[in-house]
Amino acid sequence: LAISSAGNGGQSVGSRQLLGALAESLSLWLEAESLAVCVPEIDGQAVEVALRGGESAETAFICVETQDGAAAHLAIAEVGSAGFGLSPAERREAWLFERLGERMGQGPFWALDLSCGGRRFGTVVFSLKGGLAAAEVLRRQTHELTSLGEVAAAAIDRQQQLAERERMLESLSEAGRIAAEAQQELYARRNIAAVGEMAAGAAHEINNPLAVISGRAQLLAEDEEDEGRRKALEIIVEQAQRASGIIGELMSFARPASPVKVPVEVKSLVADAIAGQGELLAKSQVQIEELVPDDLPEVQADRKQIVWALEELLRNAAAEMSEGGQVKVSALCDADGRRLVLRVEDNGPGMSAEVQEHAFAPFYSGRRAGRGRGMGLPKVRRIIEMHGGQVRLSTSPGQGTTVELILPTAE
């Protein structure tokens, strides 16, 4: 048995108010020297005790967690007529005296079941101011004792029904919230896919005139002697190529290449990604720490695509920490060895709630204009999901950003 006198345990505030009122009323009616009202929680994992008298002038509340079947008889639903009346308590409720004996004071102690409609809802353990003589008088008041137990049990039953109803409403509310979020996510992904497909189809039509514009501008620039006109033509070429690059990114997002998955060593994936972005990280004064164990299982992945995804996360971190910072790349495997988590975390400025909400939306960028196209994280998630994995994002302003890539292992 584990005892806690702090917090509410599994009982609501209303339940404790009821136990306190029962302890006070029963103590007065029984003329008890000390008294404990013991009511098991609905799940049977703990017993709530309202203790009055003994060492305490006020009612004390103690949550006793049950283990190995201790005090389990309190949770038995069906009782017979033998459940009514007094019985010696020291042996029957030994769990209570083992833990709270000193606080209960001197005995002898008696137990009265709180039963109603053939169900036991708890018990009250008490000692009497008049000792054994008072107990003998009380034993003869069978009808009064029965009524007392039934009234107290009915009150507990009502309170538990209200508490259970409240828990069900909370569970339904939480389930509704999760379902609404899942539906919103599904709609968002369908919209993204639809827009991507439409844009990818239009891209073929747009690329042709862009290629003509860029080619003609280059030809004109070669023969142009006026410096100002030549620079203007070069800008046309540059912007046409930039537009073509954006279209290429959109097409690769809408219709990505299917991954060619083979068993790949995780440590080498991380090493390749860090090497690929080493110059950028150094230029941004970003220190990188690699914490990938040598004994991790291989992942079933397209090496090129996963390295690109890791590089994109490193690029994002470097872009957010232009004045320097730290990035840690780590990896771990879950307990059953079926999933591997690649984690990239930085100590940068983090994301606002608005930016985090749209982090995986194409063409949305939390950076100022011209600093990003907003295609990085959407492509990362698309790649990981095509590998049968998922992406998790954790961030808050001033607390940095952590992105986890969860991939199935080759085993």
Image (cartoon, rainbow, N blue to C red):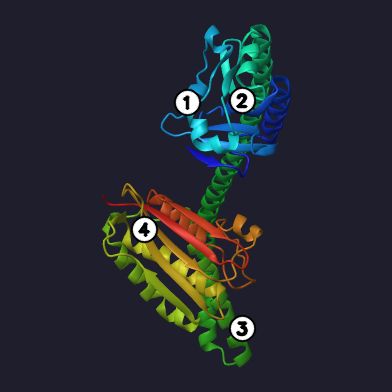
Between the C-alphas of marks 1 and 4, the distance is 41 Å
Can you identify the residue that label 4 sits on? Answer: 332
In the image, what residue occupies the spot 68% across and 15% down? 148
Disc 2 to disc 3, C-alpha distance:
97 Å
Could you give the CA–CA distance between mark 3 and mark 4, rounded to whole angstroms?
53 Å
Q: Relative to 150, say whether 43 is above or below.
A: below
Looking at the picture, tell me which residue is in the foreground, 250 or 277. Answer: 277
Of the two numbered discs 2 and 3 on the same chain, state the one appearing first in sequence.
2
Q: Tell me the amino acid under the disc marked 4.
A: Leu
Of labels 4 and 2, the one closer to you: 2
Q: Which mark is residue 232?
A: 3
Q: Residues within 10 Å of mark 4 (few under 14, many from 20)?
A: some
Whether residue 221 sits left or right of residue 27 in the image: it is left
Tell which circle, 3 or 4, labels the residue nearer the N-terminal end: 3
User: In the rendered structure, which disc, 4 or 2, sits on the residue that comes first in sequence?
Assistant: 2
The tag on residue 126 is 2
3 or 1: mark nearer the eye: 1
Residue at 57% over, 21% down: 110
User: What amino acid is found at the position of numbered circle 1 in the picture?
Assistant: Ala
Of badges 3 and 4, the one in the foreground is: 4
The amino acid at mark 2 is Phe
Mark 3–mark 4 contact, CB under 8 Å? Answer: no
Alpha carbon of mark 4 to alpha carbon of mark 2: how far?
Answer: 55 Å
Label 4, secondary structure: give it.
strand
Query: Which of the two discs, 1 and 2, sits closer to the camera?
Result: 2
Sequence-wise first label, 1 or 4:
1
